Image (cartoon, coloured by chain):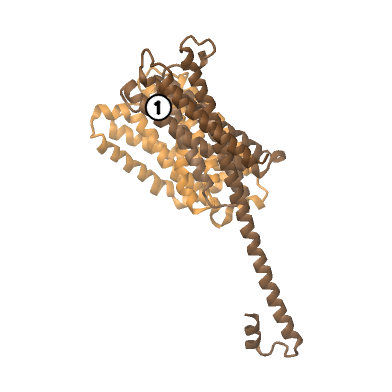
Chain colours: A brown, B orange
Amino acid sequence: MSTRVVRRIIGLTGLLLVVATVVMGLFVTPPDAVQGNLARLLYVHPPIAWVAYLAYGVTSVASALYLWRPTRARRWDQLAVASAEVGVVFTGLTLITGSIWGRPAWGVWWTWDARLTTTAILFVLYLGYLALRRIPMSRETRGKRSAIAALIAFVDVPIVHESVVWWRTLHQGATVATLGTSSKIHGIMAWTLLLGFIAFTVVYLWMTMLRFQVERMAEQLEDQEFSNWELERAKEGEIRSEAIGELLNDGTNGRDNTLIEDKVR
Amino acid sequence: MISQALAVAKKDILIEYRAKVALNQVIPFALAVLLLFGFALDTQAKVLVEVAPGIFWVVVLFSSLYLISRSMRLERDNGAIDGLALLGIDPLAIFFGKLLALFVAMSLLEIAVAVGILVLFSANLGSLALLAVSAVVATLGICSVGLVYGALASGERVGESLLPLLVLPLLAPVLIAATKCWSDASASHGGIYDPWLKLVVLFSVVFLVVGAVSFGAALED
């Protein structure tokens, strides 16, 4: 099976799973005892946040593999950028869905809570990473420099988290950790949440594969254009040297400069 | 290696001593920003004293961007860094040399800003030891991060305008922790064992190591 077919299957599966999550989340599950219908947002918000972290994890691993000489290959750099872009999209969505939930639940769009603040910093950090990739430089230099930036960001995130946790904390404790014992969440709700996690992970997989392919093709196109340009130059050079050769052979010895210039043109 | 690092530091400090960019441009800029904060907060004495530690570090961070990008521009202009490489100077020595020079310039900046805040905002210092240690350690971390990112973003015109976006979010923890150190110090309940100081130390140690490891790779083209 070609990668294109595999990618389509993954994309379709992702779409179906997301639709299933929406149906389950909006129509099948009962409203929450405390939060009412508001809790339905929690079938998407934690899965989206998880995908954002997953994406940055993949970017970090790919960057490390690119930096390490024995494993250095273009595909790791391509995977790093593909995953980072998807990660930034999902971080943005995490912040937006969190805000929408926070407004009715906490009464404000934004609070300076540890997890929110870490996510916001993460968002800006990786926007910077993507901006760094847009600076014109050679492919190898860009790959190496952005890999360093990605790894530094990766090192910084736990420190940011630690500092803001100390600073202030309000976010409700993790409910997902208790999924196994299912003491906090009702059965069907837990299953819907799990479905959400799987659905968005599949969507991540599809988006990253697609973006990876786009990056690959962009590089191939660039190479193609460059070799075309080289061929053209070589051909021009041949025509010139032929013309000069002719002139040298016809005995004028290039005394008539205008004649040579005309021919060379 | 140490003598090489010292030579690089001496070179940077000499350039700074002759050009006086920190003295003539960056410190006046920092003082202008302090005045602006005074206007923005409507010179309410109580508010000013309360926010003084935060403003100190925000002003220092913003002003440091100029010093950092200048430090790296010195190397990129006329391909000076290639000269250093051709001389066979260890990238680690370049890193620590530049770190030392940047640290000296940053210290001057911090002293000027601190005096400005003491005079303009009538802030109080409290525990001097905690303040001094936290400032020195935090500055080392800031310089280290700045140098690596300066190297990553340098080489192209667009790169320099990117530096703030790359560096500032990364420095968030040091801003939080160093500000808290000063708050604790001025409230006089913070000693040298202040928990926030530990975070500043952690940050700086981590980024000194990261900087030393990655600076050479970041310089290579």
| A119 or A180, nearer to the observer | A180
| A176 or A148, nearer to the observer | A176
Tell me: residue A185, above or below residue A140: above
Q: Quadrant of the N terminus of chain B?
A: top right
Instruction: Look at the numbered disc 1 and give the secondary structure of its residue.
Output: helix
Q: Quadrant of residue A240?
A: bottom right
Tell me: residue B54, above or below residue A38: below
Q: Quadrant of residue B209?
A: top right
Q: Amino acid at mark 1?
A: Gly
Write down the residue under mark 1.
A98
Q: Residue A85, how many percent across, how many down?
A: 52, 39
Q: Residue A232, how many percent across, how many down?
A: 65, 67
- On screen, residue A222 versus residue B194, left or right, reads right
- On screen, residue A201 versus residue B161, left or right, reads right
Give me the residue at 36% from left, 23% from top. B186
Q: Residue B147, how many percent across, how many down?
A: 53, 42
| A140 or A196, nearer to the observer | A196
Give me the residue at 44% from left, 33% from top. A93
Q: Residue A5, how many percent across, how many down?
A: 62, 40
Visible residue check, residue B92: no
Visible residue check, residue B75: yes
Chain containing mark 1: A
Tell me: residue B70, above or below residue B59: below
- Specify few, some or many for label 1: CA neighbours under 10 Å numbering under 14, 14-19, or 20 or more: many
